[in-house]
Amino acid sequence: MLRVRAALMARVRAFFAGRGYLEVETPLLAHAGAADAQIGQFVVNDPVYGTLYLQTSPEYAMKRLLLTGAGSIFQVSKAFRQGEVGRFHNPEFTLVEWYGAGYDRARLIEETCQLLGELIPDLACAPRIVAWAELFRELIGIDPLAEPTELLLQAAYDWVPSARGLTLEDRDSILDLLMSTALAPRFADDRLTVVVDYPPSQAALACLNEAGLADRFEVYGGALELANGFCEAVHHDEYAHRFAQEARKRQTRGLPAIARDERLLRGLAHAPLPPCAGCALGFDRAVMLATRASDIGTTLAFPIERA
Amino acid sequence: MDRLHPHTETIMATYSTSEFKNGLKIMIDADPCSIIENEFVKPGKGQAFNRVKIRNLKTGRVVERTFKSGDTVEGADVVDVEMQYLYSDGDFWYFMSPETYEQLGADKTAVGDAAKWLKEQALCLVTLWNGVPLSVEAPVHVVLKVTDTDPGVRGDTSGGGGKPATLETGAVVRVPLFINIGDSLKVNTQTGEYIARAKD
C-alpha cells in the first residue's frame, strides 16, 4: 500500500510539474483558523504566539501567495479537522490543493478529472457533469431550490427513515443529509460525478454566477467525495461578508469563535485576487479508490487510532 | 462497589456521537441498545451525521438511526456478568454470582432460547440492565444426558443419517444413530448441534 501511495503521489507531482505549476509549502500552524462553521479545528496554545490553529486546508495561505503574483501554484499538504473520524475520514489527512491562474470552472473541472483519471485507472467512462439541483429532481423528485423547508424536511424523513425524529434546524443541514445519504450512494461507481452550481448558501468562497448559484463543483467517485473546487471569489467584501456569516453561525450554534485571517483580508482590501479557479483533492480517498480500499485507515501508515 | 447494582452508585454518562463505537450501550426510545455499526458521513463543506446501526437489547431487533454529529445520547447501564444457573420455578430462572453469592431471577423473555440448554451450575453470561437480567447466554458447549431417543443401532459410527434425541433440559438435537438413552452428549448451544459423545 505504501508503495502504491508513493507512486500515486509521484504522479500528482509530475502532473502539476508538466503543466507549469509551482509547488509551494505554506504553514500548517497559523494564527488564523478556517471561517467555516462546519469544520472542527485543533487549537494549539503557545506561550509566545498565543492561540494557533492547525490548518484545515491551505486555502487562505495559498490565496495570500496568489495575491503576491505567484501564478499557478499547487501544494501537497496535511490538513487537520477535529471530530472527523470514520471509514472515509481521518482527522489528519492529505490534501492536494491547486490554483490555476486565469482558469474558469470548466477548465479546472477538466483538469481535475484528468488528474483523477491518471490516479484511478478503474474509471472507464467520461465524467458526468450535473447540476446540484438537477440531482435532487432526478433522484428524489424534489426541487431543492424552490421547495419550502418543511417539504424538504418531509422528503428527508421519507428518504432517510433513520433520521425521523432528528431536529434539523436549517435548510442546508437537510440538504446535506439528503445529499450524503440519499443521493451520493446512487452515483455511478465506474465514472466520476461532478456536481456543479451549488446554492448560494453553500458557496463557501466560490463566486456566484449569473443565475445566482455558486460557481463551485464537487467531484465524487461513486458515493465518495473526492474533490471540491471553486471559481474563486476575488473581492475583499465577499470574503469579509462570508467570514462574518460563518462567524454568526458559530455563535448561534454555541461553537467557539475562530480568529479570522486578517492578513488575507488586508491583502484583498489592497487588491482583488487575480482571477483563478482552485481545487482541493482528498489524496487519501483517491488512494482508496485506486486500491479499492474500503477504509481510509488502510491507505495511511498510521491512522489516528495508532498515530 | 456492588458489581450487580452499579446503577445505585453511578449516574449514567451521556455520550457524544464522537464517542460512538461498536459495543457502546446507549438508551434509544427508553430501551437499552448496543451500537453495532457507526458510519460518519459529511460533505466536506457541510453538516456531519453519524449513521448508526443499533441492536435493541430487549428485543434483539436491529434498527438504523441517524444523528447529527455532536448530538449527545444517554448511556445505558448495561453490564455483562458471569453467573451460575441455580434452578427454575417455571416463571423465573435463578442465577447466582459466584463472587458475591447474590441471587437474581431472570424472566422468560430474558432467558429466551437459553432456557432449553440450562443445567444446574452452568456458568452463563447474564446481561444486566439497571441490575435486572435483560438476557442470558448459555455456555457455548454443554454436556447433557439423553432422556429419550430411538434405540441405538450397534456398529453405526458413521454419524450419517441421524435421529432426534431429547436431552435432560428438554432440548431436542439431531444425533448419530448409535446414541442411546442415558448417553452424555457434548452440544454446541449456538448452533444447536451435536458435537460428540462425552465420557461420564
Image (spheres, coloured by chain):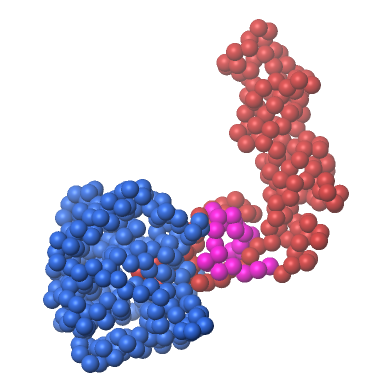
Q: Colour of chain B?
A: red
Q: Quadrant of residue B74?
A: bottom right
Asked if residue B31 lies in the magenta stretch, the reply is: yes
Percent across and percent down for residue B89 are 83, 43
Residue at coordinates 46% horizontally, 84% vertically from top-left?
A49
Q: Is residue A274 above or below residue A153?
A: below
Q: Is residue A218 above or below residue A204?
A: above
Decide if residue A67 is in sight here: yes
Q: Quadrant of residue A280?
A: bottom left
Lateral position of residue A272 relative to residue A201, left or right: left
Percent across and percent down for residue B124 are 73, 42
Percent across and percent down for residue B108 are 72, 47
Work out whether residue A90 or residue B151 is closer to the camera in this orientation and state it. Answer: A90
Residue at coordinates 50% horizontally, 80% vertically from top-left?
A46
Q: Residue furthest front?
A: A48
Percent across and percent down for residue B152 are 69, 12
Q: How many marks?
A: 0
Q: Quadrant of residue A88?
A: bottom left
Lateral position of residue A47 relative to residue B166, left or right: left
Q: Is residue A127 above or below residue A30?
A: above
The magenta segment: B12-36
**Chain given the colour blue:** A
Residue at coordinates 29% horizontally, 91% vertically from top-left?
A266
Decide if residue A191 is in sight here: no
Work out whether residue A186 or residue A118 is closer to the camera in this orientation and state it. Answer: A118
Q: Residue furthest top?
A: B155
